[in-house]
Amino acid sequence: MDIETRLLELAGQGMACSQMLMIMALEEARIECPQAVRTVSGLCGGLGYCGRECGALTGGCAVLGFFAGKGTPEEEPELDFLTILREYVDWFIDKYGKEDKTCSCQTILGGDFDRAATVCLPLVAACYEKLMELLSDYEIPLSDPYC
């Protein structure tokens, strides 16, 4: 199934941007972890549906944290974790940020949340592709022994 078809399916199930990114990354890794999907649901719609920072930006950071971040006191994050995060954030700001580097749902959608399907789904698809590219480029394994 291609990315766009999967995103439409997830949207039809009531999933939003950050959840879509996490679900698709977990599917890529063959991991079932509804806890991770629930966790990122608070990022949807711009931090709790407030129209603030885009959930594809914050949710993408959460996906990177899931696979490369520190999760227990004994663990260490991947060596390149902060570099990967910064690369994703910089890419997102360059691609979707406004002149003042604003990346809120409100500004990306031009204040019209009825445009979410036509604006957000292509944006989430591009974010998913970028996340998979970064994880591959930095040789971050798509695995988690705790889920």
Image (cartoon, helix red, strand yellow):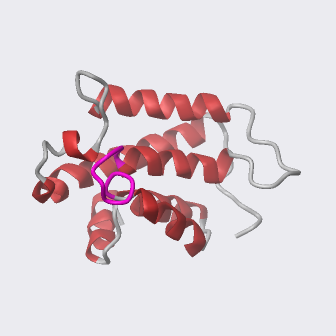
* Farthest bottom residue in view: 13
* Farthest right residue in view: 74
Q: Determine which quarter of the picture holds residue 9.
A: bottom left
Measuring 66% from the left and 36% from the top, which residue is drawn there? Answer: 81
* Magenta highlight range: 45-54
- Position of residue 126 in the picture relative to residue 39 (left or right): left
105 or 121: nearer the eye?
105
* Farthest top residue in view: 99
Picture layout, residue 78 above or below residue 122: above
Picture layout, residue 67 above or below residue 12: above
129 or 48: nearer the eye?
48
Where is the N terminus found, in terms of image quarters? bottom left
- Position of residue 110 in the picture relative to residue 101 (left or right): left
Magenta region, main secondary structure? loop
* Farthest front residue in view: 50
Q: Determine which quarter of the picture holds residue 15.
A: bottom left
User: Residue 84: where, in percent of width, then height?
Assistant: 58, 33
- Position of residue 114 in the picture relative to residue 63 (left or right): left
User: Residue 109: where, in percent of width, then height?
Assistant: 17, 46
Measuring 60% from the left and 68% from the top, which residue is drawn there? Answer: 30
Where is the C terminus found, in terms of image quarters? bottom right
Measuring 31% from the left and 74% from the top, which residue is drawn there? Answer: 14
User: Residue 6: where, in percent of width, then height?
Assistant: 34, 66
Q: Give yes or no for residue 143 being in the magenta stretch.
A: no
1 or 119: nearer the eye?
119
User: Residue 85: where, in percent of width, then height?
Assistant: 56, 35
Measuring 54% from the left and 65% from the top, which residue is drawn there? Answer: 39
Picture layout, residue 84 above or below residue 67: above
